[in-house]
């Protein structure tokens, strides 16, 4: 990977935080209560660069790369994909926040980061103040609702979860083409216009690394196996998310696979609010003003 990349977070500190699971590359900036922001696939912490400016006026922002993504370290693979389970990733995030001196914090997650975020809230309710989820439904709900139409919409769930090294080899043959097709196809306009060229430089850089391609596939293999099992165990035990939850989704995004995403999240949390944003899947980059406004209203009640 390149040693220098475009600066998208002026004034932010750049550090690496060692945890039991991974060394997490992280940017920290702003002032006020801690707010942890978790990115999704196929991106890094850079997804937040358009809304970092309005948010950092009110919060201390902590922006890590998920394990295996961006510039965080790459966990070892295993037969049960446990190192890439959202429970393991959530544990790493809690440990990171404790190292940084934050015993309690709010958090928001987009895409795969949203799955880490709601798992963190389920497993560690004592550390979470408030939770925002961007353009996802819970993992087990997606799998249980899978039909012909939905499978075509999120074909990558099945593709990336295939046994190694099948998806890795196919993606590795043309990683930039795959990356840019994936990004464009999930936007409302079906192009790359919403992404700044600087952000694309960051994503192209790490996504060309074969080991990181493999890590992101492991993330999805965990989603099809151990993450699903964790979700179903919580549902069967009647466990709920114990903090207020904000669900945001693009009106042309992936979570519109159901008529009302809030109905789904109410099965998981008794205190839910939310709304659609005028965009596709990438709320912080397609609709940054609307997204930052909604997050500020929720996190500063």
Image (cartoon, rainbow, N blue to C red):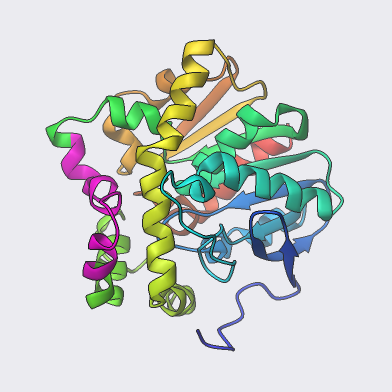
Q: In the image, which residues are magenta? A: 150-170
Pinpoint residue 183: horizontal percent, then vertical percent. 32, 62
Relative to 162, 234 lies left or right: right
From the viewer's side, name the closer residue of 43 and 10: 43
Magenta stretch encompasses residue 216: no
| 300 is higher (above) or lower (below) than 268 | below
Residue at position x 20%, y 36% from top? 150
Residue at position x 24%, y 46% from top? 158
Q: Quadrant of the C terminus?
A: top right
Relative to 174, 46 lies left or right: right
| 203 is higher (above) or lower (below) than 227 | below
Q: Can you tell which quarter of the image residue 117 is in?
A: top right
Pinpoint residue 192: horizontal percent, then vertical percent. 32, 68
Residue at position x 55%, y 45% from top? 109
The residue furthest front is 79
Q: Can you tell which quarter of the image residue 27 is in?
A: bottom right
The residue furthest right is 101
One can see residue 181 in this view: yes
Relative to 217, 89 lies left or right: right
Most common SS among magenta residues? helix
Pinpoint residue 231: horizontal percent, then vertical percent. 47, 26
One can see residue 266 in this view: no
Residue at position x 40%, y 41% from top? 223
Pinpoint residue 191: horizontal percent, then vertical percent. 27, 65
Q: Can you tell which quarter of the image residue 181 is in?
A: bottom left
From the viewer's side, name the closer residue of 139 and 149: 139
| 83 is higher (above) or lower (below) than 43 | above
| 65 is higher (above) or lower (below) than 198 | above
């Amino acid at each position: 990977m390149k040693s220098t990349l475009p600066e998208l977070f002026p004034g932010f500190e750049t550090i690496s935080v060692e945890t039991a699971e991974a060394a997490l590359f992280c940017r920290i900036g702003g002032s006020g209560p801690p707010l942890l922001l978790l990115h999704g696939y196929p991106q890094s912490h850079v997804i937040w660069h358009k809304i970092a400016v309005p948010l950092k006026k009110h919060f201390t922002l902590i922006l890590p790369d998920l394990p295996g993504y961006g510039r965080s370290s790459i966990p070892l693979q295993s037969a049960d994909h446990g190192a890439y389970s959202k429970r393991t990733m959530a544990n790493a995030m809690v440990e990171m926040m404790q190292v940084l001196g934050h015993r309690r914090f709010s958090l928001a997650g987009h895409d795969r980061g949203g799955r880490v975020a709601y798992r963190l809230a389920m497993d560690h309710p004592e550390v979470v103040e408030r939770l925002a989820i961007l353009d996802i439904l819970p993992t087990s709900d997606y799998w249980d609702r899978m039909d012909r139409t939905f499978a075509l919409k999120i074909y990558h769930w099945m593709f990336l979860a295939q046994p190694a090294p099948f998806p890795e080899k196919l993606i590795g043959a043309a990683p930039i083409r795959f990356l840019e097709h994936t990004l464009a196809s999930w936007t409302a306009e079906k192009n790359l216009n919403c992404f700044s060229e600087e952000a694309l430089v960051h994503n192209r850089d790490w996504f060309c690394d074969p080991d990181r391609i493999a890590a992101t596939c492991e993330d999805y293999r965990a989603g099809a196996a151990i993450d699903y099992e964790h979700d179903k165990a919580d549902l069967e035990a009647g466990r709920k998310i114990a903090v207020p939850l904000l669900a945001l989704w693009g009106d042309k995004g992936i979570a519109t696979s159901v008529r009302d995403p809030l109905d789904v999240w109410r099965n998981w949390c008794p205190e839910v609010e939310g709304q659609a944003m005028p965009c596709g899947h990438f709320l912080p980059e397609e609709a940054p003003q609307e997204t930052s406004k909604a997050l500020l209203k929720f996190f500063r009640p």
